[in-house]
Image: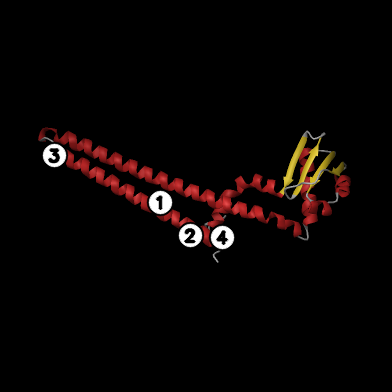
Amino acid sequence: MKSVDEDIELLARAIMVEAREEAEQLHTEAKEKAEAIWKRAQEQAESERKVILVRAKEDADRLRSQASATTQLKGRSLQLDEREKILNGVFDEVRKQLDAVKKRPDYGEIAAMLAREALSQLQATEAEVSVDETTQKVLKLDDLSKELNGKFNFGEKLEEGTGVVVSAASGKLHYDNTLETRLSRLQGSLRSSVYKLLMGEKV
């Protein structure tokens, strides 16, 4: 069974081959058009020969330049589209594996860090902390209340997500610090590094 990395590598190669073939085709078409313009120019009257040849050369150069630019743009666009698909696939796979974090022996410390960070962001001394079932078993709110000199209680259980969502000021302030939301927040800044790793480049 192929690994995700092998699938990604095969997909990336296929896209580059397709872009290269399209570039060659566009280049051939541009060359044919340029040759047709040149032939027509030679068939014109001798008195207009110099002017027509200059114009034909300009047209040919422009067509070649346009074909080259179009090829580059299409190739780049295909490459970017595939890059996005690959990256979205990687982040989707990571998202599926987030639930496994709850099985780690240090998950209690992770849960405390998530809650501490959310409470600090809201600068709340009183708050409701909504968590999933597993997090509620390991998160010691009494310890956090003493540490942060506040009064924190568990709110409604989270139906989705792993981690904590904190509400303060009678629900007016809200901070989602579930692992899923954290991944979404980090996704933009991680995309370039993840892609370089996938392509075997140094980060």
Amino acid bearing label 4: Val
Residue 43 higher or lower than 84, as above or below? above
Residue ID at (73%, 43%): 176
Q: Which residue is mark 2?
A: 10
**Colouring of the image:** secondary structure
Tell whether label 2 touches label 4 (CB within 8 Å): no
Residue 76 higher or lower than 55, as above or below? below
Label placed on residue 19: 1
- Residue 202 in sight in this render: no
Q: Position of residue 125 (x, y in %)?
A: 85, 39
Q: Residues within 10 Å of mark 3 (few under 14, many from 20)?
A: few
Q: Nearer the viewer, residue 197 or 26?
A: 26
Amino acid bearing label 1: Ala
Residue found at the very far front of the displayed protein: 159
User: In what quadrant of the picture does the C terminus appear?
Assistant: bottom right
Mark 3 or mark 2, which is nearer the start of the sequence? 2
Q: Which residue is mark 4?
A: 4
Tell whether label 4 touches label 1 (CB within 8 Å): no
Residue ID at (55%, 60%): 5
Determine the CA span between mark 2 and mark 1: 14 Å
Label placed on residue 43: 3
